[in-house]
Image (spheres, rainbow, N blue to C red):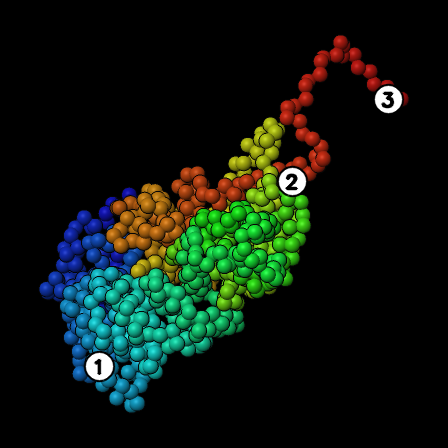
Amino acid sequence: MPPPADIVKVAIEWPGAFPKLTEIDQKKPLSAIIKEACDGWSLTNHEYYALQHADSTNFYITEKNRNEIKNGAILRLTTSPAQTALQLHERIQSSSMDAKLEALKDLASYSRDITFAQEFINLDGISLLTQMVESGTERYQKLQKIMKPCFGDMLSFTLTAFVELMDHGIVSWDTFSVAFIKKIASYVSKFPSDIAILQRSLAILESMVLNSHDLYQKVAQEITIGQLIPHLQGADQEIQTYTIAVINALFLKAPDDRRQEMANILAQKQLRAIILQYVIRAQRAINNEMAHQLYVLQVLTFNLLEDRMMTKMDPQIRDIIFELRRIAFDAESEPNNSGGNVEKRKSMYTRDYKKLGFINHVNPAMDFTQTPPGMLALDNMLYFAKHQQDAYIRIVLENSSREDKHECPFGRSSIELTKMLCDILKVGELPSETCNDFHPMFFTHDRSFEEFFCICIQLLNKTWKEMRATSEDFNKVMQVVKEQIMRALTTKPSSLDQFKSKLQNLSYAEILKIRQSERMNQEDFQSRPILELKEKIQPEILELIKQQRLNRLVEGTCFRKLNSRRRQDKFWYCRLSPNHKVLHYGDLEESPQGEVPHDSLQDKLPVADIKAVVTGKDCPHMKEKGAKQNKEVLELAFSILYDSNGQLNFIAPDKHEYCVWTDGLNALLGKDMMSELTRNDLDTLLSMEIKLRLLDLENIQIPDAPPPIPKEPSNYDFVYDCN
């Protein structure tokens, strides 16, 4: 008979003694279980003891998380969180440097556990750490020459413990003094700190800026962009990542009236060129977190265009339009203002505005009342006219010499193209917390959006000619141009020139070939014989997809633990056993390079115990207080619910892994695989299989219905002459 569901068989350790095998009844109070364990080793005052996992986490077991204990788990009997917090609180105030260092090292480790963190914070532990940073640094600096390693380690462990404690979200960031902020800022700007101290100081500054408006003001006064830039020029990518994160935080939280000012400072300090040289073009791969921070910086930079994008009219609009007209047609002199020339002047302006491709020939300013793109479109037009004057004049004159219906209207095209580019680059939207989609080419020029526009407006004119379009085809041309731009962007060109070269290879004829090829690959045959054939082979294809999903689960996946500080590298791994009966999982210190063996994963979950798989908002960890509720995380979240109200919560690294795991788990439970990835794989494999089976029938039309059965012959007296 299997053991009751509420009974868990574990081993409990006690220092200096042999572990004891025992059974834990999950219906009993945890205090009673701890008392029984204490009685087994004749320990009194059981209220001073607690159980914790004897693994790399060393997390305490509480009434809230006790259901996570699995059969075969190894637990440790140890002092309670309250007692441990009290002891460490006293030890870190020791007069002995060695004792203090060892206590701070233990504190940095214990602070990862929220149960311990709550007890230590209740003892006003955060204030103690901040006081040590504020008042102790000068005294330690005097000793630095004779005990530099000890000093560096002591400060590093102090800041690590502080970061870990604050990550639990128990204490508000608004409570810190200016003196503390100045000390942390000094470790970044002036203090000759080591890598660990610099890392944690940057992380603290980022969290301060992101979590408190008041602290943003104070941090912005203490840290300048010039003080951060040297950290980007080093070889440590993690330090570079933290540095860009601080810059992004200052950029993101800056008041609207100061963002342009900060952008100007960034330009003066040549931040873009430094990032391009020391980060993007450095001889090493860019990790996911660095890619995310570069994406955030890219988004925040483009968001500076939002004001112009949402501005309908501008006092200078008349001057800009006059300048566009002057550059295009080289008007040497304007008609004088005498009354006899008013009508002539109006007629000439109307004619030229028509040639420039404005919709409203009489008053072109009315073309810029729509937001987006607002005045941003006119800014782009003027930039193109001034910086690529020959190309601008050629486009305007070339189209003004065509028939009315065949001209590509420069004004209207520029307005719609600017709107399209804003949509592609998501100008005005806040950066996603999970996206890593940055484009290196946008870091190669100080006016990258305008240069991007200049390339694309020439592409639009070229595609218009290739399509031999008329005014009625305007929307079709814009669709083709958008496809050309999107396809070129997906290749992640390293420079604007490379982007331009990619577009040269994506002519209208090439787009038609690509569309035709994709259409053939995804063709949905609707004739009755093909539909019947699809229905017949679909189960085979689904079985093949199922096996692929299960094989991927056997390989396993590394999942990141997301919390209040995104960059905290905490990982765990989960994989399915080769016999598809058990899920093995456990925490990791770092992201693995390959598969993780089953025997290195401490925890197990029998597939037979799984009750259900839930996704999105139905996941328990998406309902918890303080859980990240943004759309991107919700779309990657799923949970396994199993016996005894247990749960295993996941946040997939990307959409592909999310689909693989939800499909695989549903397949294990005998349910349908419903993900978008399965639908795409099914369509692709079905199409390929049908085409393979129909190769011999190429160029032969398949009838929609079977041919009619011929009438019976008048007799069956068939004669064969074999001679």
Label 1: which secondary element:
helix
Label 2: element kind? helix
Q: Residue at x 12, y 62 (%)?
A: 46
Name which residue type carries label 2: Leu
User: Which residue of the protein is positioned furthest toward the bottom in this rendering?
Assistant: 146
> Are the residues at dot 1 and dot 2 in contact (C-beta closer than 8 Å)?
no
In the visual, does 104 lie left or right of 245?
left
Label 3 vs label 2: CA separation? 39 Å
Q: Amino acid at mark 3?
A: Cys
Residue ID for mark 1: 136
For label 2, the crowd category at 10 Å Cα-Cα, with few meaning under 14, some 14 to 19 and many 20 or more, is few
In the rendered view of the protein, which quadrant contains the N terminus? top left
- The numbered mark at residue 722 is 3
Closer to the chain start, of discs 1 and 3, is 1
Which label belongs to residue 692?
2
Q: Quadrant of residue 696?
A: top right
Camera-nearest label, 1 or 3: 1
Question: What residue is rendered at 62% in x and 54% in y?
Answer: 396
Whole-percent x, y for residue 111 in the image = 25, 67
Q: Nearer the viewer, mark 1 or mark 2?
A: 1
| Residue under the point 83% across and 18% down | 720
Whether the residues at callouts 1 and 3 have beta carbons within 8 Å, the answer is no
Residue drawn at point x = 66 percent, y = 53 percent: 398
Viewer-side residue, 571 vs 636: 636
Mark 1 to mark 3: distance in Å? 114 Å
Is residue 409 positioned above or below 319 on the image?
above
Q: Can residue 651 be seen in the rendering of this structure? A: yes
Q: Indicate the position of residue 620 as horizontal and vertical percent values.
A: 29, 48
Q: Is residue 109 visible?
A: no
Image-based side of 86 in relation to 554, left or right: left
Q: Earlier in the sequence, mark 1 or mark 2?
A: 1
Q: Position of residue 176 (x, y in %)?
A: 21, 70
